[in-house]
């Protein structure tokens, strides 16, 4: 462990770790991620339970991690904001010059940011998802909703792990995009279009080719990986979880490559 921290990459990672936790925005983004996941999951879960009661589906159960996963289509923007600020805040303040003086190899600097982002957001996804599932379970268990909550431990654990992976990859993807764009407004716009704006526009065209393309963009690929059955597409994503993970990982790698190319070609 000491040897790893003593390496150039280890020192860069340690520096990024200190910078991440020394600013208030990190805590605000993490709190927002938890709040958005809890509120989104609860709202979607209550809607599903209410619909089941209205249709007279006696004994119907809502697996509480399902609504929580569907809510990540919107809750992910707290994660995206945190990862974005790890890069763009340094360009805004000018501190990127100091960072590059300490870590002159730009690929190493980008790798350090990615290596800090991934585990933090993996853990944040699990915590936010767990909180959302627990609150949804407690609320839907009351008589008003017919005791409609179900919380199978094995499925819940698998769902939370997949959510953590989704948050980690989305965060690293954002780091790459932010390194390429450099400004907060531009990076957030690109991420919004890539994760939600463009997929919805393609779906609304009604063209099968456009719909198929939208399903391979990051958010829908992530929902496929998490095996979401109720989401913005109106049903399950029509390909396996493994393919969804491959598409999301591919977008993440492409974003990091774009960020690295821009870092090497442009001055700070």
Image (cartoon, grey):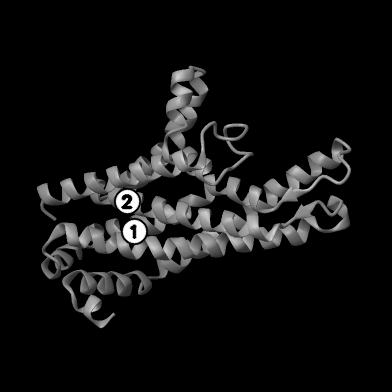
The residue lying furthest to the bottom in this view is: 2
The residues bearing labels 1 and 2 have C-alpha atoms spaced at a distance of: 7 Å
From the top left corner, tell me how far across and down residue 83 is, in percent.
37, 57
Q: Is residue 93 above or below residue 215?
A: below
Residue drawn at point x = 16 percent, y = 51 percent: 263
Q: Is residue 31 above or below residue 234?
A: below
Q: Which mark is residue 85?
A: 1
CB within 8 Å, label 1 to label 2: yes
The image quarter containing residue 139 is: bottom right
Q: Split into 4 quadrants, where in the image is the N terminus?
A: bottom left
Q: Split into 4 quadrants, where in the image is the C terminus?
A: bottom left
**Residue carrying label 2:** 184
Q: Is residue 60 left or right of residue 114?
A: right
Q: Which mark is residue 165?
A: none
Let me know if residue 35 appears in the view. no
The residue lying furthest to the top in this view is: 207
Let me know if residue 124 appears in the view. yes
From the top left corner, tell me how far across and down residue 247 is, in percent.
40, 39
* Mark 2 secondary-structure assignment: helix
Q: Is residue 141 left or right of residue 73?
A: right
């Amino acid at each position: 462990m000491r040897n790893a921290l003593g390496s150039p990459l280890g020192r860069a990672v340690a520096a990024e770790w200190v910078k991440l936790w020394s600013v208030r925005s990190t805590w605000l983004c993490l709190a927002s991620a938890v709040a958005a996941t809890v509120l989104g999951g609860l709202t979607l879960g209550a809607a599903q339970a209410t619909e089941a009661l209205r249709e007279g589906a006696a004994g119907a159960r809502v697996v509480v991690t399902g609504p929580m996963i569907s809510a990540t289509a919107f809750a992910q923007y707290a994660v995206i904001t945190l990862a974005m600020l790890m890069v763009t805040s340094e360009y805004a303040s000018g501190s990127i010059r100091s960072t590059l003086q300490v870590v002159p190899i730009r690929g190493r600097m980008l790798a350090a940011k990615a290596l800090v982002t991934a585990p933090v957001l993996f853990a944040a996804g699990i915590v936010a998802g767990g909180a959302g599932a627990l609150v949804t379970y407690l609320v839907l268990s009351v008589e008003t909703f017919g005791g409609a909550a179900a919380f199978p431990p094995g499925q819940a654990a698998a769902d939370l792990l997949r959510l953590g992976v989704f948050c980690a990859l989305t965060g690293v993807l954002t780091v790459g995009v932010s390194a390429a764009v450099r400004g907060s407004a531009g990076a957030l716009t690109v991420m919004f279009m890539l994760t939600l704006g463009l997929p919805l526009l393609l779906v609304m065209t009604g063209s099968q080719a456009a719909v198929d393309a939208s399903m391979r963009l990051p958010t829908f690929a992530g929902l496929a990986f998490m095996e979401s059955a109720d989401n913005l597409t109106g049903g399950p994503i029509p390909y396996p979880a493994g393919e969804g993970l491959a598409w999301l990982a591919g977008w993440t790698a492409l974003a990091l490559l774009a960020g690295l190319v821009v870092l090497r070609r442009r001055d700070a």
